[in-house]
Amino acid sequence: MLKGVLLSVFASLLFGVVYFLSTVLYPIQGAGLFGWRTLVTVPFVIAAVFLLKQQQEFLAFLTRLMHEPYLIVILLFNSLNIGAQMWLFLWAPVNGKAIEVSIGYLLMPLVMVLMGRFAFRERMSRVKGVAVIFAALGVFSKIWITGVFSWETAFVCVGYPVYFAVRKHFNILHLSSFLLEMLLMIPISVYFAAQVEMSWVLQQNPFAYEWLALLGLVGGIAFIAYIMASQRIPINILGLLGYLEPFTMLVVSFLIGERLEQDSYILMGCLCVAVFLLISDGMAKTKITAFS
């Protein structure tokens, strides 16, 4: 189990590195960077299928699609959703929105708690309920002070729970469906990548291809490490360790020069309390302290 914990921590740190790498790939950004990231990541997702010996599961899922063709529409929807999230993940750090996206990742588990409670009738402990209340107070304070709530934050904290809820509802919570979602992104990714004038990019950033290769390598290793971790530790512990990623993203945000605006102080404080409550609740239930 300790190996699984270390793999999860390693994956979260690497995802933080991916967040940072988007800033050194300038002038590639936005849709072009999304296209290149997809193209350099897909080979590692395919490699994960073989590394984790999921070939039979992949073939079985293809057979299921033949008998349930409506799932192709579901995969297209999920592919669009996760593709947009990947684009935002790379777009935010180079457009001064890294903190807003990081806050979205902090809010996401709380939204998932609510979705589990109301969409899947999952039980919600009293501690989780208090955590959700703190998060809601933070969000309302942000709206009250500024009159708006960042669309980047909302897109992350709502989009990902919808993505996971759809996967759970249609029983496609496995690597095979994710690989097909990634493969469905290839046509649009090729189009976006082709719009990037690489000769001009190389004049501005002579090591652009090397950085792209590193982006694919780091992102691929992070993905494989996370999948391997999910096979070795309980899902509750995996979820708790997942909180390391948004905090890593926040650190990257500060390192690249962004600062938390005063109108977000209450929101961040409430989120820190909410995350602490969720972690405490999870530790109590999974007895994670047994690792020490």
Image (cartoon, rainbow, N blue to C red):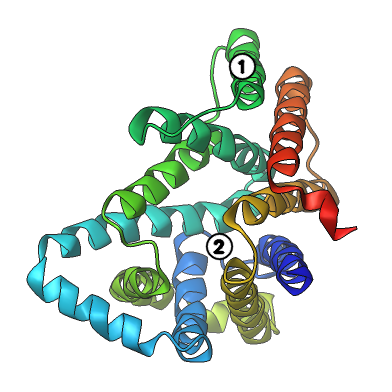
**Image point (70%, 27%), residue name:** 274
Give neighbour class at mark 1: few <14, some 14-19, many 20+ (Cα, 10 Å).
Answer: some
* Image: 292 above or below 240: below
Q: Is residue 151 among what the camera can see? A: no
Q: Nearer the viewer, residue 225 or 285?
A: 285
Mark 2 crowd level (few <14, some 14–19, many ≥20, 10 Å Cα): many
Disc 1 secondary structure class = helix
Q: Quadrant of the N terminus?
A: bottom right
Q: Where is residue 249 in the image (x, y as percent from the top left)?
A: 72, 51
The vertical placement of 31 against 246, above or below, is below
Residue at image mark 1: 133
Mark 2 belongs to which amino acid?
Gln
Q: Residue at x 55, y 39 (%)?
A: 108
Query: For residue 187, which quarter of the picture?
Result: bottom left
| Residue underneath mark 2 | 29
Q: Residue 241: image x %, image y %?
A: 71, 54
Q: Do the residues labelled 1 and 2 touch (CB within 8 Å)?
A: no
Quarter in which the C terminus is drawn? bottom right
- The residue furthest top is 144
Task: Using the image, tell me which numbered label, if any, was put on residue 256.
Answer: none
Left or right, residue 237 beside residue 67: right
Secondary structure type for disc 2: loop
Q: What residue type is labelled 1?
A: Ile
Q: In which quarter of the image is residue 26?
A: bottom right
| Residue 6 horizontal/vertical position (percent) | 78, 69
Tell me the residue at 65%/12% (across/down): 141
Count up the numbered dots: 2
- The reply to whether residue 190 is in sight is yes
Instruction: Tell me which residue sits at (73%, 29%) in the image.
Output: 277
